[in-house]
Image (cartoon, helix red, strand yellow):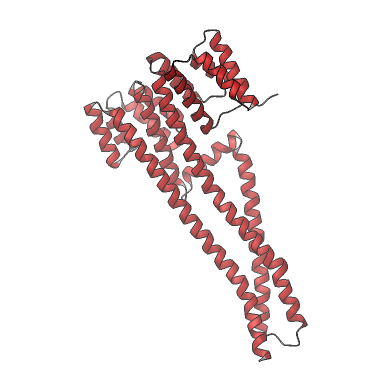
């Protein structure tokens, strides 16, 4: 059975951008899907676009054809439905282009954060294997063949260096193996959900996970409000987009409170968007400028996320480099002390 195709955020951004260009130029969606399919090299994507084209030929709505293909996320399908119903499909697709470009940038940042420690651990493992497997045994052989008595403490340092090097090399390879298993598990829906839940509770990643979820919520609200969607309905849909249990619970509470409170009051009550951004939304709610303010707040969250990811990468890189320096330096000192002892004895 052929595995269902699921588009990445980058592919979705490109698709939404192409549809926006079609609508602006007056090309029908049916003709546009035919043109996209002809240009596509990937067989699975080509088949999906041809299926969409065939459904459109049968006078099916655009959102229903996307839903039938099962390759497009529910959020995009729902937003297309809103765009078709409100007559703002072009605006919606343009907004979705920016949304998925943002999602791709975030995913790229996360991939970089994950790739960095793996590369560092790999470097540690390779260096220690070279030290323990080649360099230290060579020195031991040289010391054994010399007619010089090496001090007991120097001999112990040499043995300690060998012992520490083997342990750290083994731990490094074990970490790489665990990381590989987690990466393969992350490719499954169950693994992805479990690791996301872990990231929302682990002390080192909790703050970043909260920021990512809030940024995704604000970005979704910006898209939906600009499309003319009802605020309460937008909140409900945003809860489906955000994959963070804590933020989802707060959004659900907001939806229940919005029967008696305004959007800004509900957000403030649940502390989803706080600080200056929260005050701006409160003022915009009273002045009827929610669309503009949510768009600006979404941009600010993008900048905060990029800054947070950058600082996290810097701290992680610094920690790993220091750790690598201490371990490798310690092993090298275990070699240098006996060597100094031998030179002193000869002198």
Residue 101 horizontal/vertical position (percent): 46, 34
Q: Residue at x 59, y 52 (%)?
A: 118
Q: Is residue 347 left or right of residue 72?
A: right
Looking at the image, the residue that sits furthest to the front is 25
Placement of 54 over or under 221, stated as above or below = above
Q: Is residue 215 left or right of residue 7?
A: left
Q: Residue at x 49, y 44 (%)?
A: 109
Total numbered labels placed on residues in the image: 0
Residue 4 visible somewhere in the drawing: no
To which quarter of the image does residue 95 belong? Answer: top left
Looking at the image, the residue that sits furthest to the bottom is 347
Q: Residue at x 42, y 33 (%)?
A: 248
Placement of 283 over or under 118, stated as above or below = above
To which quarter of the image does residue 181 belong? Answer: top right
Residue 10 horizontal/vertical position (percent): 52, 33
Residue 310 horizontal/vertical position (percent): 44, 50
Quadrant of the drawing holding the N terminus:
top right
């Amino acid at each position: 059975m052929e595995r269902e195709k699921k588009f990445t955020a980058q592919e979705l951004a490109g698709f939404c951008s192409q549809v926006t260009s079609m609508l602006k130029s007056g090309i029908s969606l049916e003709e546009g899907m035919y043109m996209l399919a002809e240009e596509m090299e990937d067989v699975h994507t080509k088949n999906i676009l041809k299926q969409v084209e065939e459904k459109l030929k049968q006078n099916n709505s655009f959102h229903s054809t996307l839903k039938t293909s099962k390759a497009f996320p529910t959020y995009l399908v729902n937003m297309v439905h809103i765009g078709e119903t409100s007559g703002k499909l072009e605006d919606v697709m343009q907004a979705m282009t920016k949304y998925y470009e943002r999602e791709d940038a975030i995913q790229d940042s996360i991939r970089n954060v994950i790739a960095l420690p793996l590369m560092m651990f790999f470097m540690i493992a390779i260096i220690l294997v070279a030290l323990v497997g080649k360099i230290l045994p060579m020195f031991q052989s040289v010391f054994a063949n010399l007619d010089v008595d090496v001090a007991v403490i120097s001999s112990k340092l040499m043995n300690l260096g060998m012992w520490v090097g083997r342990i750290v090399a083994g731990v490094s390879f074990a970490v790489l193996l665990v990381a590989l298993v987690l990466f393969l598990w992350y490719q499954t829906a169950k693994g992805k959900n479990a690791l996301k839940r872990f990231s929302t509770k682990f002390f080192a990643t909790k703050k970043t996970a909260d920021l990512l979820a809030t940024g995704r919520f604000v970005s979704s609200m910006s898209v939906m409000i600009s499309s003319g969607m009802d605020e309460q309905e937008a909140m409900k849909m945003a809860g489906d987009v955000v994959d963070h249990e804590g933020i989802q619970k707060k959004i659900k509470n907001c939806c229940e409170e919005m029967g008696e409170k305004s959007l800004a009051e509900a957000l403030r009550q649940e502390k989803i968007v706080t600080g200056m951004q929260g005050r701006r939304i409160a003022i915009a709610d009273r002045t009827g400028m929610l669309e503009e303010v949510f768009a600006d707040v979404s941009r600010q969250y993008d900048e905060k996320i990029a800054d947070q990811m950058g600082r996290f990468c810097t701290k992680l890189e610094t920690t790993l480099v220091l750790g690598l320096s201490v371990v490798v330096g310690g092993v090298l000192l275990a070699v240098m002390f006996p060597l100094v002892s031998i030179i002193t004895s000869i002198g």
